[in-house]
């Protein structure tokens, strides 16, 4: 069953990148200091990212939860890959595994065991001057574990509805080839929106806000985020809520080529992410699809009114 959201103001694997190369050179940033809350650049260190180069850094963890940010200045153009790196940082968990690639930006927040932790930044594509910062999370912070990143996958081919496009998707896709129809906006879908439709919605500048669970409580939690976003963003209809049992964390938000995941709802960071990536798809030209259909299924009416001839099934 679909529910209409109420507006309050009128609410990783390889992408299209070069193959992994052997490390040729190494740079050592040494040990990082822990900055105060909200002062990301106060102790930031800079390094040169280049394909085939590994930059090594380390930091000491205590009982204080931290935020680690690696920012290589990714381009604003949604079709530009920009600099790409992977991370070898086992203590940061699966979100920082070296088998996944990040296109110029990665932020990780969480609590680590006391001791020294190593983070290796592995250059995969392009070159850039990057900044690494390490800050404390506020003592009042309740949601400690989250991450966000930019995808290196710029693919956007249309594949006929129902056909397998997963060969082109990352483990948690926020871009890639997709089906020729997109979901209706401003909806709560109580069943998972098919990924082939979801990605097309992101390409059109929308946001997908999702919970891993299909329970009412979890969907209500992400719907509350949408409502808060709509209060501050006039005419923010280009988004939808859906469960996604395959996502890597309890809650997630996706814009075109950008992903945010968290183990609990952190309104401040979630709303900041939504504001930054809303209406930044590569085809920010369409509203609702011309034909209403249920994107939790693969049944799309064949009335020749959709944007692409491969839309119907």
Image (cartoon, rainbow, N blue to C red):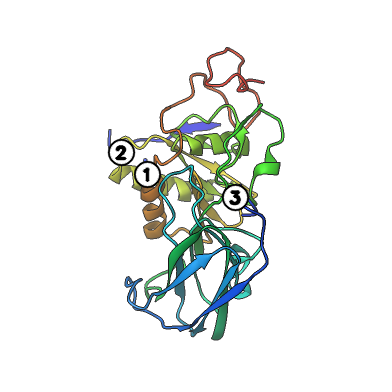
- Residue 113 seen by the camera: no
Which residue in the structure is indicated by mark 3?
213
Which residue in the structure is indicated by mark 2?
8
Vertical relation: 195 (above or below) 125: above
Quadrant of the rendering where the N terminus is positioned: top right
Closer-to-camera residue (148/19): 19
Q: Position of residue 204 (x, y in %)?
A: 46, 34
Q: Position of residue 46 (x, y in %)?
A: 42, 73
Residue drawn at the location 41% of the way across and 59% of the way down: 73
Disc 3, disc 1: CB below 8 Å?
no
- Residue 34 seen by the camera: yes
Residue drawn at the location 39% of the way across and 43% of the way down: 278
Residue drawn at the location 63% of the way across and 53% of the way down: 18
Crowding around mark 3 (Cα neighbors within 10 Å: few <14, some 14 to 19, many 20+) is many
Quadrant of the rendering where the C terminus is positioned: top right
Residue drawn at the location 58% of the way across and 73% of the way down: 120
Closer-to-camera residue (168/197): 168
Which residue in the structure is indicated by mark 1?
227
């Amino acid at each position: 069953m679909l529910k209409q959201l109420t507006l309050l103001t009128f609410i990783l694997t390889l992408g299209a990148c070069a193959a992994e190369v052997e490390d040729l050179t190494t740079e050592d940033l040494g040990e990082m200091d822990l900055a105060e809350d909200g002062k990301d650049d106060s102790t930031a260190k800079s390094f040169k990212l280049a394909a085939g180069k590994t930059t090594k850094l380390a930091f000491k963890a205590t009982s204080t939860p931290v935020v680690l940010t690696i920012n290589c200045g990714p381009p604003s153009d949604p079709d530009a890959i920009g600099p790409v790196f992977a991370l070898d940082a086992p203590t940061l968990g699966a979100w920082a595994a070296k088998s996944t690639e990040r296109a110029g930006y990665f932020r990780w927040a969480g609590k680590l065991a006391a001791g020294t932790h190593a983070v290796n930044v592995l250059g995969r594509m392009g070159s850039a001057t990057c900044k690494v910062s390490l800050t404390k999370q506020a003592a009042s912070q309740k949601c400690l574990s989250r991450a966000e990143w930019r995808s290196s996958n710029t693919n956007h081919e249309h594949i006929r509805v129902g056909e397998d496009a997963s060969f082109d998707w990352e483990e948690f896709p926020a871009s890639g080839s997709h089906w020729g129809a997109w979901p209706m906006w401003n909806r709560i879908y109580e069943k998972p929106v098919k990924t082939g439709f979801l990605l097309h919605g992101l390409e059109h500048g929308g946001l997908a806000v999702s919970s891993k669970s299909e329970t009412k409580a979890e969907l209500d939690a992400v719907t509350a985020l949408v409502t808060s976003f709509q209060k501050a963003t006039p005419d923010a209809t280009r988004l939808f809520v859906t469960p996604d049992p395959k996502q890597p964390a309890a809650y997630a938000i996706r814009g075109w080529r950008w992903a945010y995941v968290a183990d609990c709802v952190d309104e401040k960071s979630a709303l900041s992410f939504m504001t930054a990536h809303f209406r930044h798809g590569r085809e920010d030209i369409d509203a609702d699809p011309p034909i209403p259909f249920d994107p939790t299924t693969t049944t799309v009416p064949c009335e020749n009114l959709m944007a692409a001839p491969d839309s119907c099934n």
